[in-house]
Amino acid sequence: MPIAGTALLATAAVVATVAAGCGGGAGAAPKITTTARAGVAPVPPKDGAYFGAWVPPERGGKPSGTPSGPASGAGSSSGAPSGSATPGKDAGKPGMGPVAGFERELGRQLDIVQSYRSWTADFPAGLDRSAADGNRYLLLTWAGADTKKIVRGEYDDLVQRRARAIKALGKPVFLRWSRDMDTAPARKRVHSAEDFVAAWKHLRTIFQQQGVDNVAWVWCPTARGFGGSHAGSYYPGDDQVDWICADVPPRGDSEYRDLSEELKLFLQWSRDRHKPIMIAEFGVPAAYRERRAEWLGEASKTLQDPQVKAVVYFNSNELAVNAKDKRRALAVTGDKHAVSALRGLATTPYFNPRNLPVTSGG
């Protein structure tokens, strides 16, 4: 069905409520709330889900803060990106060449461009600014740090600088801080769920003190972390989170699994939260070979869930141990059947809530 442009919520108050739209078989549309400021920060579309991607820089380079292994101007009055939505546009802007090439393959412009930054990196810069300065949302994935040091105030100056820089950007930004905090590799810096929650609240307080209202806070453990009811213990609370999220890192084995299997427990947990859902890292392993298109077709059905409001494809092989590791290679580039299937997902009306122009792709 044709879908209207980006949602304008009824009020620019601190709490915004939207009704989810049509979509896959997840039952009645839930009531969704977010503490993000409507008209300034990214809010969920009234119908469907934004589609975005992580597209690595050229020549295999990585910006600081990218995943290293498995499981690891003023804004518009509506808070929506503005500008041309031509697929592949802005290729000449810093960092945007690979993104524009990926958009041409898909036959549509991305709603969301993901960028990874380390804890101490200066941002927004390069790709961050290019993505925000146009018809796309920036999803800024900011690495974590020692939670106890954060709470003690040892990083307050750094956090204040980053808060002021994001405010000065003047564009709506998704901020995904310390993703995958529930995993074993993160334990040394996270310490405990209680420490993580305290650090999250400390960061949000500093951003509020700096008057930053163009940020939507995205809380994002792994989907797998809900298998033992563990990941939910890191949740800071409904008043502290704008979007709930899950990453779906590839497993080390080659057994075929539909995305629905990986997301089932996370989606069940999310039903009680009444928050918009983002799937910020998902992808189909190259090891699935001729079944990659099938996997993406099934993923499209799973993600057409009335609570899912943003999906971000991980178009990269950087999680792979080596060139032979096809189990963790998720980029579809170069696989014409997989590209065609992902294009089918990305151009499905549910994943094009702003009704952006669609071309034949390729």
Image (tube, rainbow, N blue to C red):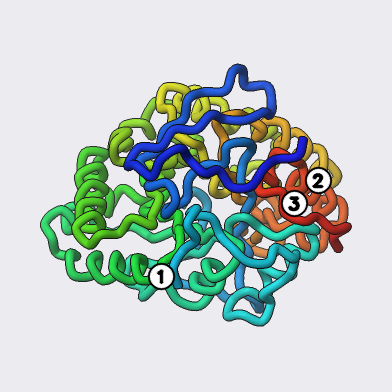
* Mark in front: 3 vs 2: 2
**Can you give x and y, in whole percent of width and height, for residue 209 in the image?**
19, 58
Residue at x 82%, y 43% (from the top left corner): 293
Q: Disc 3 and disc 2: Cα gap in Å?
A: 18 Å
Count of labels shown? 3
Q: Disc 1 and disc 2: Cα gap in Å?
A: 33 Å
**Can you give x and y, in whole percent of width and height, for residue 119 in the image?**
33, 66
Give the vertical position of 356 relative to 23 (above or below): below
Residue at x 77%, y 47% (from the top left corner): 347
Q: Disc 3 and disc 1: Cα gap in Å?
A: 37 Å
Give the vertical position of 168 relative to 176 (above or below): below
Q: What kind of residue is marked 2?
A: Gly
Query: Which residue lies under the disc numbered 2?
Result: 344
Image-based side of 200 in relation to 27, left or right: left
Residue 227 visible here: no
Query: Which residue lies under the disc numbered 3?
Result: 286
Image quarter for residue 23?
A: top right
Secondary element type, mark 1: helix
Query: Which residue lies under the disc numbered 1?
Result: 169
Along the line of sight, the residue nearer the viewer: 352 or 336: 352
Residue at x 56%, y 26% (from the top left corner): 264
Q: Quadrant of the N terminus?
A: top right
